[in-house]
Amino acid sequence: MRLANKTAFITGGNSGIGLATARLFVAEGARVVITGRNQATLEAAAKELGPNALPIVADATDIAATERAIKQAVEKFGKLDIVFANAGISASTPVGGTSLETFESVLKTNITAVFFTVQAAAPHLSDGASIILNGSVISVLGNPGYAAYAASKAGVRAMARVMASELSPRGIRVNVVSPGGTSTPIWNRTAPTPEAIAALEARIAKAIPLGRFGKPEQVAKTVLFLASDDASNVQGAEIFVDGGATASPAGAPIYRG
């Protein structure tokens, strides 16, 4: 077991990539604290994960709630060994059609809340701990209509490198996992029915060299790698889990004869 006797704190751990990661962490021997805004989905996730999981209702943008959640985690399990700052939102923010409230809500969730999650956890981290931030391919792809989301995820990458510099004296590693198109509930507003989801995934898959959407479990396995001693010499890195969308876009099905 790669995470035996480790304690992990996962924001947005009640669905999607966060929940998939929590499942994998528990299977690898970790105690896991999961946070989220929805009490019902948190309790359902905790029931599935078993006795080594602690669910805490906390909106990532509520800094005081995050600090309380960290305190509860430490009181329950002691020092923290892993932080996965996973919680995030997406919204359409096109030039000429975006309100200040919408733009700022994306930044507040995806970058400000991430910083303060790490700040709250830092005093309680074991030396040699691992912090993983959730990025996105959107930070580099230039997708129309996603200025705030792209800016926030590019900020995550830059911020991770600064954090890595600051925390290196304690042997704490800070890295980024950046998913491409992945089957998670984040798409529900864009495609609210199973048929719409299937059509959306099929369309986007044409621009992915491997020709398919990713699964949350594939991202979770990369997070596990970064959290474990297998990545003990990986610092300030960003790993794309995107089927080649950023590195070799010309290999996508849409360009094939």
Image: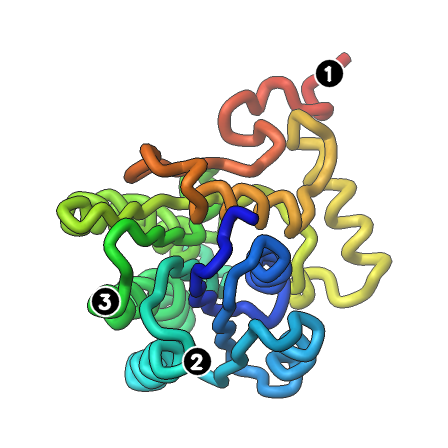
Query: Which residue in the rendered view is the most extreme toward the right?
Result: 195
* Left or right relative to 184: residue 162: left
Q: Earlier in the sequence, mark 3 or mark 1?
A: 3
Q: CA distance from mark 3 to mark 2?
A: 16 Å
Return the residue nearer the eye: 9 or 158: 9
Report x, y in % for residue 57: 49, 85
Relative vertical location of residue 10 with respect to residue 138 in this rendering, above or below: below
Tag count in the figure? Answer: 3
Residue picked out by circle 1: 256
Residue picked out by circle 3: 119
Q: Earlier in the sequence, mark 3 or mark 2?
A: 2
Q: Which mark is residue 222?
A: none
Q: CA distance from mark 1 to mark 2?
A: 44 Å
| Three-letter code for the amino acid on which mark 3 is drawn | Gln
Marks 3 and 1: which is nearer the front? 3
Report x, y in % for residue 58: 44, 82
Q: Quadrant of the C terminus?
A: top right
